[in-house]
């Protein structure tokens, strides 16, 4: 039986899920101050865009 390496965590902790959460939190904060729900969607979109970008120096 072969051993499967379970240590396959990403070395970059800034993955897309984290950025979407940060964007949602920022959008929710702006929504709370302006009472316009479109800011939540804008925050999610910005978070997804930040999570999608490759860090500098990463080849893949």
Image (cartoon, rainbow, N blue to C red):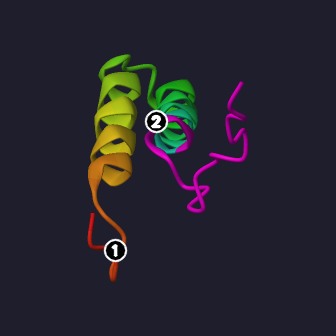
Using the image, determine if residue 12 lies above or below residue 17: below
Residue 34 is drawn in which quadrant? top left
Label 2, label 1: how far apart the Cα atoms are: 21 Å
Which residue is drawn at the image coordinates 38% and 16% (left, top)? 37
Q: Are marks 2 and 1 in contact (CB under 8 Å)?
A: no
Say few, some or many: other residues with alpha carbon within 10 Å of mark 2 (under 14 / 14 to 19 / 20 or more): many
Q: Nearer the viewer, mark 2 or mark 1?
A: 1
Using the image, determine if residue 35 lies above or below residue 3: above
Sequence order check, earlier mark of 2 and 1: 2
Q: In the depicted view, which residue is nearer to us: 30 or 23?
A: 23
Say few, some or many: other residues with alpha carbon within 10 Å of mark 1 (under 14 / 14 to 19 / 20 or more): few
Position of residue 13 measured from the top left corner of the image (x, y, whole percent) = 61, 56
Q: Is residue 17 left or right of residue 1?
A: left
Using the image, determine if residue 58 lies above or below residue 5: below
Label at residue 20: 2
Q: Look at the image and tell me in which quarter the C terminus lies.
A: bottom left
Position of residue 24 measured from the top left corner of the image (x, y, whole percent) = 50, 31
Q: Is residue 34 left or right of residue 32?
A: left
Total tally of numbered discs in the picture:
2
42 magenta-colored: no
The residues colored magenta run: 1-18
Using the image, determine if residue 60 lies above or below residue 52: below
Q: Secondary structure at mark 2?
A: helix
Q: In the depicted view, which residue is nearer to us: 18 or 36?
A: 18
Label at residue 58: 1
4 magenta-colored: yes
Which residue is drawn at the image coordinates 72% and 47% (left, top)? 7
Q: Secondary structure at mark 1?
A: loop
Label at residue 25: none
């Amino acid at each position: 039986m072969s051993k499967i390496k379970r240590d396959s965590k990403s070395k970059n902790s800034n993955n897309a899920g984290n950025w979407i959460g940060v964007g949602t939190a920022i959008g929710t904060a702006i929504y709370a101050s302006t009472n316009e729900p479109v800011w939540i969607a804008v925050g999610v979109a910005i978070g997804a865009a930040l999570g999608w970008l490759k860090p500098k120096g990463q080849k893949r």
